[in-house]
Structures are given as structure tokens and as C-alpha cells.
Image (tube, rainbow, N blue to C red):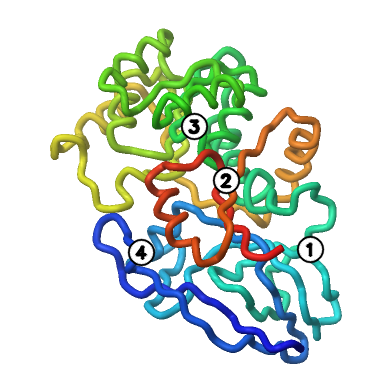
Amino acid sequence: MPERVNRRIILAARPSGFPSLRDFRLVTEPVPAPADGEVLLQTVSLSLDPYMRNVMEEVGPGYAPRVELGAPMVGATVSRVVASRHRGMREGDLVLAAAGWQDYAVSDGTGLTVIDDMRQPSHALSGLGMPGFTAHVGLLDIGKPRQGETVVVAAATGAVGSIAGQLAKLAGARVVGVAGGPLKCAHAVQVLGFDACIDRHDPRFAVNLRDACPDGIDVYFENVGGAVLLAVLPLLSIGARVPLCGFVAHYNGAGTPGGEDHMPALLAALLQKRVHMQGFIILDHYGARFGAFQQHMRPLVDDGSIRIDEAVVAGLENAPSAFLDMLAGRHLGKVVVAVAD
């Protein structure tokens, strides 16, 4: 095997507030060699996801294990088998793996899925992978949109929100997105097919959202929390459904707007309007639902009914800065790092 090095981006420090580049460090090590029954994987594409901010520090049980200091950051990858001592894997196979932020990893084959019939392999990290699956389960299992209802989607042009909104449109709902800035809002309406999109940075955001939802909000797909959730609460219809996917506005320790206690407003809305709010962790659903999800989604992606947006960043060394940009909302769609050809 030609002499190579394995670049790894490790967690150098636990962030306080918004992460910085100092929290990461790039190290090089020898490329590991596979033992009997193992394969050597080379990372082709790396997924960047908001949940990674949570596992950089202490997280509660039932979510995901934290990343230890000095360990490589975790993440899903599209990887190529470059050496195989595993009877079920061939050199050259492309697989969906969890190799993390590094060039190479050794696997015994557990959890690897061969990618053999996808037009765009990186879609296994986006619309046909975890983000699309998250949108599918959250919207259809918990949100249950019906013909003519109003669905509001936070982070509407992100990896999950963009798919959730398009699925809601296919279900016959009226879809209102919430996004950061006029360019993202224009993309949601003109490209993704949302009926309206409200800029959360606009000083009149709450008023504009109310005007866009004259009949109330039947389903709110929650990705954000913060001021967006506060504007949504008084607009929820009786019996509204709220899939709780994330609350990125609070991931970096930010307080509630104005430092006020908004818990009474949340509890009042849930009680008085008989709201069904359910949190979900997508890892719980792979065993029973992932195959059905792909059978439903692949034809929709192939015929153009569902659009997948990917923001591709070149180079493993740029993963930390791309991750910070993602947390700051500077990308459209799913953020993917192109690590190797």
C-alpha cells in the first residue's frame, strides 16, 4: 500500500458559547491497516450537522455520546473501500459510514451500507439520508399535515426544513417558511415552492408571520426555538401539532429574547390550544422506518418532485470553518465537505 497519512480533525477544547476555530485541531497519523474481517475506508464526503454542536460538550442520556477531547469529531460519511479483508466488501465500493472528520478509518463492516443505486452519492448524507429521514418522520408521523392546513417550517432552507416544507406541499398544505434573510426567503418561494417565507431578521417578523397565517398555524416544524417560537405560539390553532426537531437558537447558550422567562407563554399555549408537541431523535427510527422512507423519497427526488440543495465545501481542513458557517446560517441546504475525489 502506498505510504499515506491520515488527517484527523480532533476536538481540542469544549466551546463556551459559540464555537471557535481554536476548539478544533488538525493532526496527522499513519493510515491504519485493516485486520482480518475489516476494511479500510477513505472519506469521500463528510456530513456537517447542527447536532454536532451538542456532542462537543456534555449531553443528556438518550441523545448521542459526547466527543471526548483529543478524539476526532463525529459525522456521517460517504466513504470508499480502499482495502478489504472483509468477505462482504469489495475494494472500490462506496458506502455510507460514520467515519467522522478524518481521511481514513477502519471498520469491521458494522453499520456500513453500500451505495449502489444513487445518482448522486452525497444525497445519502442529505435528502436521501439522515436530514431527509428526519424531515420525513417529523412531518408525516408527528405533524400529520392535511389538505388545506397551514404548515410553518423554521430554518426553511436548511437540510431538514427544505425537505419538510416540500413534503408538506405534496400533502396539500399551505406552507410558510421562516428563514434568515431575503435571499433565503426568495429561494424558499421561487425554487422550493413554498407559498410564503418570512425573514426572521426583519424587525416586523412577528407581524409579518401573523399576516402570512391568517387562519392560524396547524403544524409548526420546530428547528430553531428563540424568537421564532415565541412568534409562533399565539398563532397556533387548537389541536396544532409541533414536531420538535431542534432548537439551534439555544445550542450556544443564548438566553431567551430580552432575558425574560417565556415558559408560562409556552405552557399556556400547549394547554389552552391542546397542542401536541413531540420531540424525536431520528436514531430511534432507523430500524423500522428507513427502508420505507427511501422507497417513498427516491422516486420523488428522481422525478424532481423533491429538490435537494447541497452546499459543498472543498477540503477536510475547511470542515471547522464550514461548521461554524453552518451554525451561523450562512449556507443553503445541506452542508457537505468534499474530502476526496
Q: Earlier in the sequence, mark 3 or mark 2?
A: 3
Q: Earlier in the sequence, mark 3 or mark 1?
A: 1
> How far apart, in angstroms, are the residues tagged by discs 1 and 2?
23 Å
User: Which disc, if any, is residue 114?
Assistant: 1
Q: Earlier in the sequence, mark 1 or mark 2?
A: 1
Q: Secondary structure at mark 2?
A: strand
User: Which disc, if any, is residue 156?
Assistant: 3
> How far apart, in angstroms, are the residues tagged by discs 4 and 1?
33 Å
Name which residue type carries label 3. Ala
Which of the two marks, 4 or 1, is nearer to us in this view? 4
Residue 182, position as x, y percentages in the image: 42, 24
Name which residue type carries label 1. Val
Q: Secondary structure at mark 1?
A: strand
173 sits to left or right of 115: left
Name which residue type carries label 2. Ala
Q: Decide: few, some or many residues near mark 4? Use Cα within 10 Å; few <14, some 14-19, many ≥20.
A: some
Task: Name the quarter where the C terminus is drawn.
Answer: bottom right
Vertical position of residue 173 compared to residue 6: above or below = above
> How far apart, in angstroms, are the residues tagged by discs 2 and 4?
20 Å
Name which residue type carries label 4. Leu
Circles 2 and 4: CB atoms closer than 8 Å: no
Tell me the residue that label 2 is attached to: 311
Answer with the quarter of the image where residue 84 lies: bottom right
Tell me the residue that label 4 is attached to: 21
Circles 3 and 2: CB atoms closer than 8 Å: no
Q: Earlier in the sequence, mark 4 or mark 1?
A: 4
